[in-house]
């Protein structure tokens, strides 16, 4: 409330255009009818209630997931894990790696010329990748087989 009062003090009063002598070649513009739109909304909080909406959905079209169902599913999967300490160690290592990489990227970004150089390296690698794997049909097939073999290695089926 005090901010709104302070804001209204800073606005100069509207000048009556009949008493003003114009010494300019600019065209005449009529005076504004209201004060700034910000103060109009601040002084009239009732109008905000007209803009509020609520999202609802019917049960037929609902695709939301039940929280208890999700929690029980996660608990079943966690109980099925044999090496819980290994999973926690890998998860913690991944979080630390993301944290360290964000620090590294921030440090690189603070050096004046390095961000543009890294951008050029990224563009060059993207161009090479497109030329090597995506441009020709035979290389696209090679990329697909490489991805499938990588999937098998990660899943442990190979």
Image (spheres, rainbow, N blue to C red):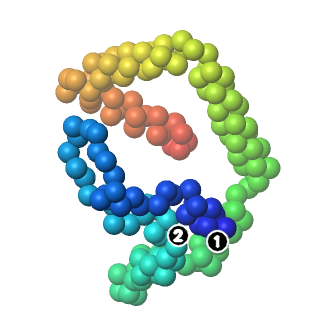
Mark 1 surroundings within 10 Å by alpha-carbon count, few (fewer than 14), some (14 through 19), many (20 or more):
few
Residue sitting at x 33%, y 66%: 33
Please indicate whether residue 28 sits to the left or right of residue 42 in the image: left
Let me know if residue 125 appears in the view: no
The CA span between labels 1 and 2 is: 8 Å
Q: Which residue is mark 1?
A: 1
Decide: is 68 above or below 88.
below
Residue sitting at x 33%, y 29%: 143
Q: Farthest bottom residue?
A: 59
Please indicate whether residue 65 sits to the left or right of residue 127 in the image: right
- In the foreground, 131 or 23: 23
- In the foreground, 32 or 47: 32
Question: Which quadrant holds residue 146?
Answer: top left
Where does the image place residue 13, in percent across and percent down from the top left?
47, 61
Q: Which residue is mark 2?
A: 42
Where does the image place residue 35, in percent across and percent down from the top left?
42, 63
Q: Secondary structure at mark 1?
A: loop
Decide: is 41 above or below 82.
below
Residue sitting at x 59%, y 72%: 70
Decide: is 55 above or below 84.
below
Decide: is 143 above or below 44.
above
Question: Which quadrant holds residue 145?
Answer: top left
Position of the N terminus by quadrant: bottom right
Marks counted in the figure total 2
Let me know if residue 145 appears in the view: yes
């Amino acid at each position: 409330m005090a901010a709104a009062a302070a804001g209204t003090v800073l606005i100069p009063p509207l000048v009556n255009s009949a008493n003003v002598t114009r010494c300019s070649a600019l065209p005449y513009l009529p005076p504004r009818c209201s004060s700034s739109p910000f103060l109009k909304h601040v002084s009239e909080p009732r109008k905000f209630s007209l803009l509020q909406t609520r999202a609802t959905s019917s049960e037929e079209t609902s695709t939301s997931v039940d929280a208890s169902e999700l929690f029980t599913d996660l608990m079943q999967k966690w109980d099925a894990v044999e090496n819980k300490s290994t999973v926690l160690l890998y998860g913690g290592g991944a979080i630390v790696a993301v944290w360290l990489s964000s620090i590294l990227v921030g440090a690189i970004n603070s050096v004046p010329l390095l961000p543009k150089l890294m951008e050029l390296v990224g563009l060059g690698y993207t161009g090479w990748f497109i030329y090597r794997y995506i441009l020709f049909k035979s290389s696209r097939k090679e990329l697909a087989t490489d991805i499938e073999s990588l999937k098998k290695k990660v899943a442990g089926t190979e």
